[in-house]
Amino acid sequence: EGSGTNRTKSNIQIPTENPDYWYRYCSMEGGLRKAGVVGIRIKSDMVSWPVMHGKVRTLWHCVEPGRYCGLILLFSARNGEPIAILNDGYIQHMRVGATAAIAAKYMAREDASVVGIIGSGGMAETHLQGYAAVRKIEQAKVYSPNQAHREDYAKRMSRELKIDVLPLDSAREVVRGSHIVACCTDAEEPVIRGEWIEEGMHVTCVKTREAGEDSFSRFHRYVSYRSGLCEQHWTTPEDWRPPGFGGSFPGYMKHAEIVPKRSHLTALLVGRVSGRESVEEINFFESEGTGIQFAAVGYRVYTLARQNGLGQELSLDWFTQTIRN
């Protein structure tokens, strides 16, 4: 509709005195004409890439493990006023799961009832919640290399959604027989293989590297939700950089080019393209996010918080000055 806009995700990478950690500043922003709001999401992370359970993982923390710093700043596009500062933890998970659910609403088979989840963290929770909102899900399967995590996930989600959620011993078992498959991991290498993918499946990846290169020859349709490749800004020479860069990368996009039908999620939502044209079709949704999600979801959370008397009022004098710019 042309009523919203994004600035492409951007990272600044700085090495630290500890060779196992890099500092990453990440930002993305978007604006909505109808709501009259602009939002910027910023993250301040210490990033590492340890090998855990036999796979390279990307881990983040701020100050110390278990503590995180993600903020959403909202501004009024009607008078320029800064209107809210929000923590992004729950919003981050919810906006990704909801976007994946919207894509599945258009791209998954109408009779899809079995979901396979690879991963057992916050993203895995909101993806399954989202799928249950757009399809009549009867069973879910979950794999995480941490047995205790996947078993706890299965118990919690089964209780919440009133469906059978089975913890399984491998990603291969999770994919087998599923109608919708969601990869919700922090892995820096593939967690799903092309030979596993079955006719009629709808597949989603939170991180681009989760889908193996051989997967793309199996897909009939590729739908993405990005506003360009993530911009990387460095404080080091090219030969001195970390193994995981975050976001999409040119080599990955070359894999996507072999998929016969490719489009952006927005084209799907406004009816310019179809999300599925047959029961047999295998579809793929790549859900790397955009700033407009944080503007939209952040503004909704802000509105509900005001209506329910939640949050802390901050003085406008702290954030504005009576001086000419």
Image (spheres, helix red, strand yellow):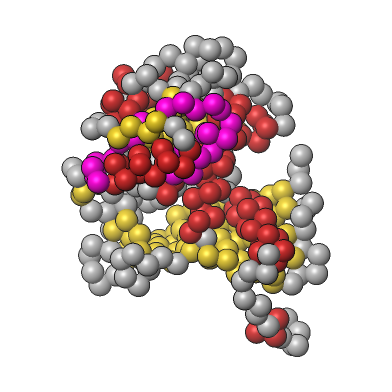
Relative vertical location of residue 189 with respect to residue 74 in this rendering, above or below: above
Q: Is residue 139 magenta?
A: yes
> Could you say which is closer to the camera, residue 255 or residue 57?
57
Relative vertical location of residue 108 with respect to residue 72 in this rendering, above or below: above
Name the spot of residue 28 as percent of width and height, x first.
Answer: 56, 56
- Residue at (72% x, 31% y) in the render: 270
- Residue at (66% x, 24% y) in the render: 273
- Report the number of numbered marks: 0
Locate the N terminus and report the quarter of the image it occupies.
top right
Q: In screen coordinates, is 73 left or right of 4?
A: left
Q: In screen coordinates, is 36 left or right of 268?
A: right
Name the spot of residue 265 as percent of width and height, x first.
Answer: 61, 34
Q: In screen coordinates, is 103 left or right of 194?
A: right
Q: Which residues are magenta?
A: 124-148
Is residue 319 at least partly visible in the picture? no
- Residue at (65% x, 36% y) in the render: 266
Q: Is residue 27 magenta?
A: no
Name the spot of residue 63 as percent of width and height, x first.
Answer: 35, 72
> Could you say which is closer to the camera, residue 232 or residue 145?
145
- Residue at (53% x, 65% y) in the render: 87
Location of residue 253 (image quadrant):
top left
Name the spot of residue 179 as percent of width and height, x first.
Answer: 45, 22
> Could you say which is closer to the camera, residue 187 or residue 258?
187
Is residue 78 at least partly visible in the picture? yes
Residue at the extreme left: 54
Relative vertical location of residue 199 with respect to residue 215 in this rendering, above or below: above
Location of residue 125 (image quadrant):
top left
Locate the C terminus and report the quarter of the image it occupies.
bottom right
> Could you say which is closer to the camera, residue 121 or residue 319?
121
